[in-house]
Image (tube, grey):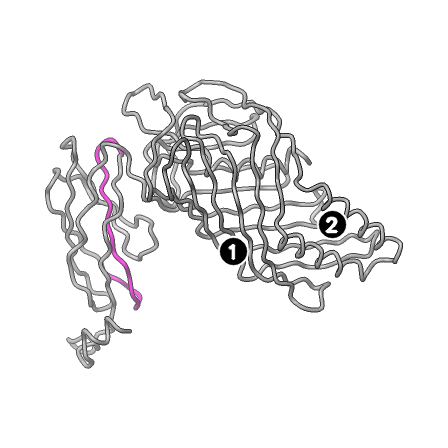
Amino acid sequence: MKFKLFSIFAVTVLLFSYIPSYSSEKNLSIDAPKWSAGDSWSYRGIANYTIADDPSIGYVNFSTDDFIFNVEKVDGSYYTISMNSQLHIDGYINLEDIGIKTTIKLKNGKIYGTAKINKNNLGMKDFEIGLSGVVIASIAPVPIPLKGGITGGFETPYYLINFPLEENKTWATPSTNFTINLNEDMINFIKNVVSIIEKFLPPDMADIIDEFMNEVFDILPFKIYIPSLNMKCLGMQDIKVPAGGYSAFLISMEDTIPLYFSPNAANFVKANYSGGSEANIEMISTTYSPPGAPERPARPKGKNLVIKGRKYTYETMSNSPSNKKIQYGWDWDGDGVVDEWTDFYQSGEKVKVGHAWEKRGKYAVRAKARDEYGLESKWSEPIKVRTWIAFGNYPLHHLFMRNVFYYFS
């Protein structure tokens, strides 16, 4: 069980701790990357934990839709990373021996915070995490507000990747002590939950739990031993995630957890653990652009107001620093994911692509460029597009004040 819990924790830590740089050589050897302020990576993830490997006793499900890691600052020996996401939690607990049975749900959950990453070995030094939302439990008479924070740090910056990274390389991570602390708001939240549970327990058991919790809070901050882990880079694989298709290194942690990262994305693009409990994370978008990638494409040109179901043409252009051919990925629905890739064009050549929207709505249309070696640019600035229903040969928006209605609706 300890390894299972640590594995789920490790998958999460990996995704904002260790990011490789790009090399165009056939035999890749990846050094620690250099990030810039404003680089960001967005993920979605799910995880579940089953108590005693028996869902009838209890389980907890976690999920995030758009977990964003952003480089806020590059200063001295460290990068300062921010993180922000919606957080969804639901669970069930059935402890028959002590008479506790309840469902649990976190509504309007948010997780946010910062972390410091060492520039030389990409080891994590410390982090601060904030949590907020409302906990709804069937055992509780009213919803319980959640607001609190957690801080943590390692004795020395803790790294999982031994750079330079290359195929077939094996290594062991260092063992270290990890310190974690709870702020006053988080302690008060836990005390509030415990007080509700104690109402359903015999007085002698409630007293025991109360005494135990006081002892726990007295020894804050906690020190947790992090064991050494066996790591191996197994080679390269092509993998597809919502952010696109990538050629990625496959790293095995303890021959159990596969981790995929792409030099072109400068980040892990996917990680998953399955062993009774599960954790799966994948990249859905990024603003990172590797060295030598095509320039950010020009903002697309085309109609802002279009008729639903009718095809319209949009134009953009980019340049390759090495004069490589370029193809363009188009995001037609504004979700930050490529919906369509074009054929290859000469560097600097304008490309025109047609598209029709089948649903009425507002869309932020943008494009990115990718060269023959798979290096991708940042997204272009978006153009706002709104679809309308046709009335005869005219769209309905002709019946209104066109510009006022569009820009202020």
For residue 288, side relative to residue 166 (left or right): left
Sequence-earlier tag: 1 or 2? 2
Residue 133 vs residue 241, the one in the foreground = 133
Q: Residue 165, which numbered label? A: none
| Residue at position x 84%, y 58% in the image | 201
Q: Is residue 221 left or right of residue 242?
A: right
Task: Pick the residue in front: 301 or 407.
Answer: 407
Picture quarter containing residue 239?
top left
| Residue 57, numbered circle | 2
Left or right, 322 with reference to 104: left
Question: Dot 1: within a 10 Å radius of its alpha carbon, few (fewer than 14), some, or many (20 or more) residues?
Answer: some
Q: Which region shows up in magenta?
A: 356-374
Q: Residue at x 33, y 19 (%)?
A: 27
Residue to which mark 1 is pinned = 110
Q: Residue furthest left?
A: 349
Kindly report which numbered mark, 1 or 2, lies closer to the viewer in this rendering: 1
